Amino acid sequence: MNKQGFGLLILLLLSFSFPSFTLAHSHVIQSTPGEGEVLDTLPSTVSVTFNAPIQAAFYSLEVYNESGERVDTDENVLEDNVLKNKLPNEVENGSYTLKWKVVSKDGHPTEGSLSFVVDVKPAEKPIEKEEIKQEETTVEEKTPVVEEKIQPEKTTPEIGHTLTQSLLYGSLSLYIGVLFFHLKLLPNTVSFHINNRSKLLLWISYVGLTLSILLSLPLQARSISGSISDTLTLTTFGTVWFVEVLLLFFLLLSTWLLHKASRKWAAALVILLLLSIMLAKSFIGHTMMASIPAAAITMNFLHLAAMSLWLGGLLAICLVLPRAAKHVTNPDERKTVYWQVLHNFSSWALIFVSVLLTSGVCSSLLHIDSMDSLLTTLYGQVLLAKVALTLAMILFGAYHFFRIKGKKKTLGPSVLIEFCFGIIVLVLAAILTNLPTAI
């Protein structure tokens, strides 16, 4: 049993480490001209090629001379993952800067720049259209395709996105955890009833969830330098946001219904809506950069659902179990209820960990490419911190498992420590969603 648990722990930690490593934002892999290139013929077009298709909105490719004046013709053309722009015929010799800004499929803005030099002898400057066409061919033949090393300018997480994501994860966990506690963790000997404390926690969770979703729209619009209306109508994020708001409306109705009449089917309906929001969230972010988006979305949904139920159940044990046990008047029965809840949670936790493991391994097969930057990038360092805290949570879980099995003393402050570690893990997960990955 101990060996199996240790093996499960190692595999789980690996699954936490791997999935996100190649879920990077879009980055430039080729450019024409190349970084630092000296051109002896006048280029008619410039272009940058990204590692994956980008969203057909909020993109720009601009060329500036040494004086900071824009010299391109402002004719941006996007073809799948290639962004192009044209230069006028009268471009003078000198140094130029090529700047780009796009929104990747995961909804994150990416920008960068490179420099090149035009050094065309007067006799070689094109005059007639036929010569211009000939020079375009020459540029394409002579200009090397350069692998771009420039990274996006922003490598630190935005505080607004981090806070809203943390609020989202925490609200989802508390919301689904309280309901799961009443549906599955309390023994059948206790009648189904949503007590006042649970109702308060549900409404707090709803407010937190609503705020996180509503605030995500202006934050996203600001991050891509676009208007709210354009973000809604031109991006995948906007489509998903509409779906989330619709789900919030139905969630409000079902939670109100559960508040008025404690029924198991109403609680199950609320859980279904919460899972639907998790699924919708999986359609934006890093999953859209995967080689097989459908598989990545599925694994991300399972990962988020399992983690929310695991941590949410722990939250419910800390916040709801003491009040629920007080409704049992007989001391012996109260003790039985206490240990039965912990035993039920232990069994379900094993299932959640198994789902986390499976989704992590499958994500690894989809996304693993390189782990060289694990120790040298901010993303890798935050990920290591998350893995370390997850390890601590699992160790506390193992300790609680054997304590429950022996039915010794109550769990005491150790479960609160595990809960605090879980909250920090959620914050670190929110930070990771807003960082370029360790590629």
Image: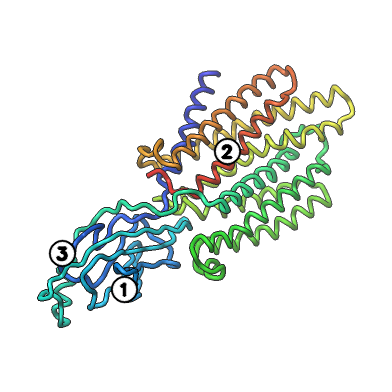
Q: Pinpoint residue 299: horizontal percent, then vertical percent.
A: 50, 45
Label 2 sits on a secondary structure element that is helix
Q: Earlier in the sequence, mark 1 or mark 2?
A: 1
Q: Amino acid at mark 1?
A: Asp
Q: Which quarter of the picture shows residue 397?
A: top right
Residue at the spot 89% in from the left edge and 25% down from the top edge? 330
Residue at 46% over, 33% down? 14
- Is the C-beta separation of discs 2 and 3 under 8 Å? no
- Circle 1 or circle 3, nearest the eye: 1
Say which mark, if any, is on residue 342: none
Which residue was labeled with disc 2?
A: 425
Q: Residue at x 47, y 51 (%)?
A: 287
- Name the residue type under label 3: Glu
Q: Residues within 10 Å of mark 3 (few under 14, many from 20)?
A: few
Amino acid type assigned to the residue bearing label 2 in the image:
Val
Q: Earlier in the sequence, mark 1 or mark 3?
A: 1
The answer to whether 202 is drawn above or below residue 404 in the figure is below
Badge 1: residue crowd in 10 Å (few <14, some 14–19, many ≥20): many
* Res 141 label: 3
Of residues 94 and 14, which is closer to you in this image? 94
Residue 72 shows which numbered tag?
A: 1
What secondary structure is found at the residue carrying circle 3?
helix
Position of the C terminus, as image quadrant, is: top left
Nearer-the-camera pick, 203 or 279:
203
Q: Label 2: how many residues lie within 10 Å, few (<14), some (14-19) or many (20+)?
A: many
Give how far apart the Cα atoms at labels 1 and 3 are. Answer: 22 Å
Q: Up-down: is 163 above or below 8?
A: below
How many marks on residues? 3
Pinpoint residue 237: horizontal percent, then vertical percent. 53, 60
Residue 316: quadrant of the picture: top right
